[in-house]
Amino acid sequence: MKVLVTGSTGYIGHQLALTLAKEHITVHALCRDIHSPKVPLHEKIVLFEGDICNKTSLKRAIKDCDYVFHTAAYTNLKCKSIQNFYRANVIGTENLLEVSLQHGIKKFVFTSSLSVYGPSYKDIPITEEQPRLSSYANDYELTKSMAEERVAAYAKQGLPYVILNVSKVYGPGVKTFSNGVNRLIELIAKKNVLFVPNRIEVTSNYVYIKDVVKAHIEAMKRNLANEKYIVGGDNISYSRLFEKIKTLTKSQTKIVKFNYGLVKTCLAVSSFLGNIIGKSGLSPQVLEALFVCRNSLSDKAKRELKYRTTSLEKGLIETINSLKVES
C-alpha cells in the first residue's frame, strides 16, 4: 500500500507519516523543502519536493498511491491577508482533490479543525450535528470551512472522503507554529511570572497527538466514507490546565491576570499601528480565537472509528518528558 501525506513537515503530518511508515506502509511525503530538519525520515518514506498549489508536483507525488492524507494548511492567525489562507487552504485543497479524483484515490482523509463549528453554545459540547451559530472569527476558520465544502463536493464525483475536525493538539513532536499547548508548557515551566487575560475560566478541548494520528489511520482503514468526525480529548478550562501543568512540572510560576477588555483594546491599537508600518502581530481576532469556549464530544468517532483517547494527565506527562522541562 502507498499513501500520500501532505504537510509532512507539520506537527500532525510529520507524526502521521512516521507512524504509517512504522506500520510498513509506503509514504509519499510532500514537502516544500526536502532539506528541512522537520522532514520525517524512514526507509518507508519517499520525499517529494512540491507544493499543494502546484499540480505538477502533486501528480508526481500521488503516482501509485491508494490513499491521501491532506494535513497541509496555512494556520498563521497573525497574517492579515486572506489570500494566504485562501491560496493554501482552498485552492491547494481543490488542486489535491482534482488530482486525487484523476488518479482513482480510494479515500481522501482531510485534516480540518474543530474551530469550523464556532464556539460551543453555553455549556453544550459541540457535536457533528451542530450548525455554526456565529460568524467566522478569522480567515483560517473561514477557509477551512470552504475547503470542507470542496471536499464534500468531490464525493458527488466519486471521490470518497473522511473529514476529521481536530481540537487543540498537544504532545511530543516537531516544533511548529501550531504547537500552542507545548509552548504554554515551556512558558509555565521556565517563567517566574505568566501574564494572561482574565478569561481563564473559558473551556476548550485538548487532544493528544498520538490519538489524532490513530484516528487518521482508522479513518483510512475502516469501511466508512463521506463522514465527518470530531477528534478531541478532554474539556478543561485554562485555569485548571495551568494548575495541572504547574503541578506536573513542579513550577512556581505566578499567574497574573489582566483585564481582557483592556488587553483587547491594546491589541487593536497595536494592530492598527502594525498595519501602518507593515508589521504583523497578535490581533484582537487572534485573542478571541484563543479565549472562546469550545467544548466538544467525540462520541461518533468512538463509535464508528473505535477512537480512544489518552487522559489529559497522561498526555501532559509524556509531553513534559519529551520537552525536558520538569523542574
Image (tube, helix red, strand yellow):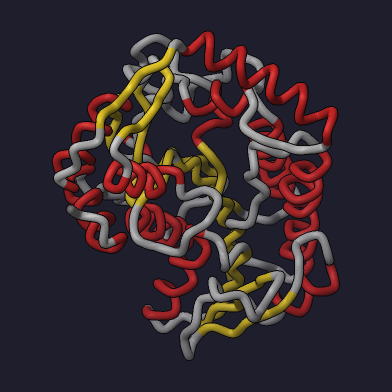
Front-lying residue, 12 or 225? 12
Quadrant assignment, res 247 = top left
Q: Residue at x 77, y 24 (%)?
A: 273
Instruction: Name above or below for residue 244 compared with residue 322.
Output: above
Front-lying residue, 203 or 218? 203
Q: Residue at x 52, y 48 (%)?
A: 178
Quadrant assignment, res 127 = top left
Across and down, in percent, residue 231 comes to 40, 43
Q: Residue furthest bottom?
A: 43
Figure label count: 0
Residue 275 visible, this angle: yes
Across and down, in percent, residue 139 comes to 71, 32
- Would residue 252 appear left or right of 77 to someone viewing this image? left
Instruction: Name above or below for residue 233 compared with residue 52.
Output: above
Q: Residue at x 46, y 43 (%)?
A: 166
Q: Residue at x 83, y 41 (%)?
A: 83
Quadrant assignment, res 131 = top right
Q: Residue furthest front?
A: 192
Front-lying residue, 316 or 210? 316
Front-lying residue, 226 or 195? 195
Across and down, in percent, residue 123 comes to 34, 13
Residue 303 visible, this angle: no
- Would residue 173 appear left or right of 118 to someone viewing this image? left
Across and down, in percent, residue 183 comes to 41, 47
